[in-house]
C-alpha cells in the first residue's frame, strides 16, 4: 500500500518528528488503509483484536511502547504481549472496561480502555486503547494515582480509628472496690439505650469508660463518634454537632456538611467535657434527644437520628447550674445513669498494677519495680490521676538503664512530696530554722536510705552536687 506515498517510513521508531503529514486517498477502496494510516498518527496506543483475541492491527505508538515489531505481531494472541490481558474476558462478556490499570513487561503501568466491537449483536473483536500520550505522562499520572491511593487509605484508617471504640471494660486496669463497682454499673447501663454520664477528675479514665460503654452496648458495631466540647471553638461547636446547610453562613461548604450527631447514627455519640457545651447548643441537644430528629444549622428540613449519648465531665455540673452555666433540664436528662470514677489518690491499691501495666505496654515487662518506688507513688497526691502516673512511668522508662525502676527515676516532686509529708502528731514544734534543719536531715536520711547510701544517686535524686551532699551529711552527722 502507498496511501500517503511514504509507507516505508511508517516502521521507524515512534516520534512526532518522524511522522509525515497525512494525505487522504481520493478513492474509497483505500479508506481502510487510510484509517490505519491515521491511527498511526494518534498519540495513543491502539490494538484491534479479532474474536479469537488475535491481533489484527497494532499502531505505531503501541509497537513503540511494547518495543514490538508490529508486522510480526499480526496474528499473534494478545496474551503473548500481555500475559494477564483481560481482552478475552471482554470478548466473552461484551462489556467494555474503561480506564483500567494494566502493567507492561517493561514495568510500565498504563491506563487502558477495552471496547468490544459488535456486529449483528455479536462481539466480533475488541479495540484496546491506551489513554495517555507518552511514558512520562503515564508515569506522572500513575505516580499521582498511587500517592492519592496511599493518602485515601491513610485518611480512611484515621477515620476508622475516630469512628470506632478501642477500649473495653477488660482493658480498664484496677481491682479497687470502688473502681470495680463503677465498671459493673457502667456495664449494666451500657445494655440500656439511655444517656450515660461519666464523672471523674481529669485523667481518671472517663474516655476509657466511654469506649467501654459503647463496646458493651448493642451498638458496638455502629460508629463511635467522639466530640471534645472543650477543644472546639464555641462558635463552631453548633455546626460541628448539628451540621449545616449550603449557605448557612459565610465560609460554609457548598452542599453543606453533616454534623457529628448524624455521623453517630446507629452508634454512640461521646460528648467529652460536656460542661463546656454552650447553653444554646445544650438546648438544641435536648431537643434532639427528645425528638430523635435533627435540624442542620440554617436548614428547615429535619432528619431522623438514632444514637446513644455518653457524656463526660470533670466539672461540677450542679454548681454550674447555680451559676446559670449549665441547663438544669439537660442535667436531669443526663443524670439518670451516672458513673463516678474515683480519683487515683482514693484507690492507691491500684497503683502497683497500673505501673506494671504501663511498663508492659511500653515493651518493658521485665523491668522490676523497687518497693520504695511503689511506696512513694502510693504516698503521692496524683492531681493528674492515671494520666499523670502513666507519664511518670513513661519518663522512668526513658531513664532506666538497668532492669530496676528505682527512686532516682522518679520526678523530684514525687520524692519531695513524701519527704514533705508533715509529722501527723508533732509533739513539739521548734523555731522555723530548727524545724527546717530537722526536715532537711529527714529528707537526706530518707534519700540515702532509698539509694542504699549511694552518694552519687542521692545527689542526683535531690538535685544537688555530690560535694554539697557530703557537706550536708557532715553537718547533720549522717
Ligand atoms: N484504669 C485504667 N487502666 C489503664 N489505663 C488507664 C486507666 N485509667 C486511665 N488510663 C489511661 O490514662 C490516660 C487518661 O485517661 P482518659 O483520657 O480516659 O482520662 P479522662 O478522665 O478522660 O481525662 P480528661 O478529663 O483529662 O479528659 C489514658 O492514656 C488512659 O489510657
Ligand atoms: Mg477525657
Image (cartoon, rainbow, N blue to C red):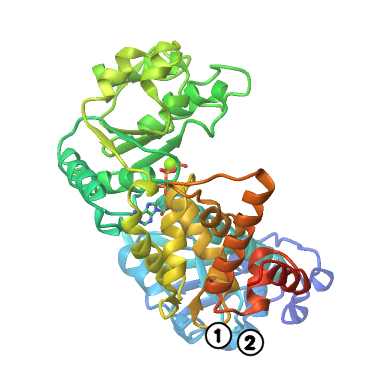
The residue nearer to you, when weighing 14 against 215, is 215
The residue wearing badge 2 is 69
Question: Which quadrant is home to the N terminus?
Answer: bottom right
> Does residue 3 show up?
no
Give the quadrant of residue 400.
bottom right
Q: Which residue is mark 1?
A: 73
Q: Position of residue 45 (x, y in %)?
A: 61, 69
Is the CB of the residue bearing disc 2 within 8 angstroms of ligand 1? no
List the single residue furthest toward the right: 17
Q: Is residue 68 above or below residue 245?
A: below
Q: Nearer the viewer, residue 375 or 70?
A: 375
Pick whichever, 148 or 297, lies toward us.
Answer: 297
Q: Position of residue 193 (x, y in %)?
A: 18, 33
Q: Position of residue 191 (x, y in %)?
A: 15, 41
Identify whether 272 is placed above or below 432: above
Q: Is any part of residue 320 visible from this angle?
A: yes
**Residue 271 lies in quadrant:** top left
Residue 190 vs 354, above or below: the answer is: above
User: 169 left or right of 59?
Assistant: left
- Tell me the SS state at disc 1: helix
Q: Secondary structure at mark 2?
A: loop
Distance from disc 2 to disc 1, alpha carbons, whole Å, reads 6 Å
Q: Position of residue 194 (x, y in %)?
A: 20, 30
Residue at point 55%, 18% (across, down)? 247
Q: Name the side, left or right, on which 35 lies relative to 21.
A: left
* Quadrant (top left, top right, bottom left, bottom right) of the C terminus: bottom right
Task: Give the residue at x 61% y 56%.
Answer: 438
Q: Which mark is residue 449?
A: none
Marks 1 and 2: in contact by CB < 8 Å?
Answer: yes
Name the image quarter holding residue 192: top left
Q: Residues within 10 Å of mark 2 (few under 14, many from 20)?
A: few
Amino acid at each position: 500500500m502507498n496511501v500517503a506515498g511514504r509507507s516505508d517510513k511508517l516502521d521507524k521508531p515512534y516520534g512526532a518528528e518522524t511522522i509525515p503529514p497525512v494525505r487522504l486517498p481520493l478513492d474509497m477502496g483505500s479508506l481502510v488503509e487510510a484509517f490505519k494510516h491515521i491511527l498511526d498518527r494518534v498519540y495513543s496506543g491502539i490494538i484491534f483484536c479479532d474474536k479469537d483475541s488475535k491481533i489484527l492491527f497494532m499502531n505505531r505508538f503501541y509497537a513503540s511502547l511494547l518495543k514490538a515489531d508490529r508486522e510480526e505481531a499480526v496474528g499473534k494472541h494478545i496474551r503473548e504481549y500481555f500475559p494477564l490481558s483481560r481482552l478475552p474476558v471482554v470478548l466473552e462478556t461484551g462489556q467494555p472496561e474503561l480506564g483500567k490499570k494494566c502493567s507492561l513487561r517493561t514495568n510500565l503501568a498504563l491506563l487502558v480502555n477495552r471496547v468490544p466491537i459488535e456486529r449483528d449483536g455479536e462481539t466480533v473483536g475488541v479495540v484496546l486503547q491506551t489513554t495517555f500520550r507518552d511514558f512520562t505522562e503515564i508515569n506522572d499520572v500513575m505516580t499521582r494515582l498511587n500517592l492519592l491511593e496511599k493518602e485515601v487509605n491513610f485518611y480512611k484508617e484515621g477515620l476508622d480509628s475516630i469512628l470506632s471504640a478501642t477500649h473495653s471494660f477488660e482493658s480498664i486496669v484496677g481491682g479497687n472496690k470502688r473502681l470495680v463497682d463503677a465498671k459493673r454499673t457502667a456495664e449494666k447501663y451500657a445494655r440500656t439505650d439511655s444517656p450515660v454520664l461519666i464523672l471523674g477528675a481529669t485523667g481518671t479514665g472517663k474516655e476509657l469508660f466511654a469506649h467501654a460503654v459503647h463496646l458493651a452496648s448493642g451498638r458496638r458495631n455502629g460508629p463511635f463518634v467522639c466530640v471534645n466540647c472543650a477543644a472546639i471553638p464555641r462558635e463552631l461547636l453548633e455546626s460541628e454537632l448539628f451540621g449545616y446547610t449550603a449557605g448557612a453562613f459565610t465560609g460554609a461548604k457548598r452542599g453543606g456538611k453533616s454534623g457529628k450527631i448524624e455521623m453517630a447514627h446507629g452508634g454512640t455519640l461521646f460528648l467529652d467535657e460536656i460542661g463546656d457545651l454552650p447553653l444554646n447548643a445544650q438546648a438544641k441537644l435536648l431537643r434532639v434527644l427528645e425528638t430523635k430528629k435533627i435540624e442542620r444549622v440554617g436548614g428547615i428540613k429535619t432528619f431522623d437520628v438514632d444514637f446513644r449519648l455518653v457524656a463526660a465531665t470533670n466539672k461540677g455540673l450542679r454548681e454550674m447550674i447555680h451559676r446559670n452555666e449549665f441547663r438544669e433540664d439537660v442535667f436531669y436528662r443526663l443524670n439518670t445513669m451516672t458513673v463516678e470514677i474515683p480519683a487515683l489518690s482514693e484507690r492507691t491499691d491500684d497503683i502497683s498494677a497500673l505501673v506494671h501495666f504501663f511498663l508492659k505496654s511500653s515493651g518493658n515487662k521485665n523491668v522490676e519495680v523497687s518497693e520504695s518506688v511503689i511506696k512513694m507513688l502510693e504516698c503521692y497526691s496524683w492531681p493528674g490521676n492515671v494520666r499523670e502516673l502513666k507519664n511518670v512511668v513513661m519518663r522512668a522508662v526513658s531513664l532506666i538503664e538497668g532492669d530496676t525502676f528505682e527512686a532516682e527515676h522518679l520526678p523530684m516532686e514525687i520524692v519531695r512530696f513524701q519527704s514533705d509529708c508533715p509529722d501527723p502528731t508533732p509533739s513539739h514544734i521548734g523555731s522555723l530554722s530548727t524545724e527546717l534543719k530537722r526536715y532537711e536531715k529527714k529528707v537526706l536520711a530518707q534519700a540515702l536510705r532509698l539509694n542504699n547510701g549511694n552518694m552519687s544517686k542521692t545527689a542526683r535524686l535531690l538535685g544537688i552536687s555530690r560535694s554539697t551532699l557530703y557537706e550536708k551529711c557532715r553537718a547533720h552527722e549522717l
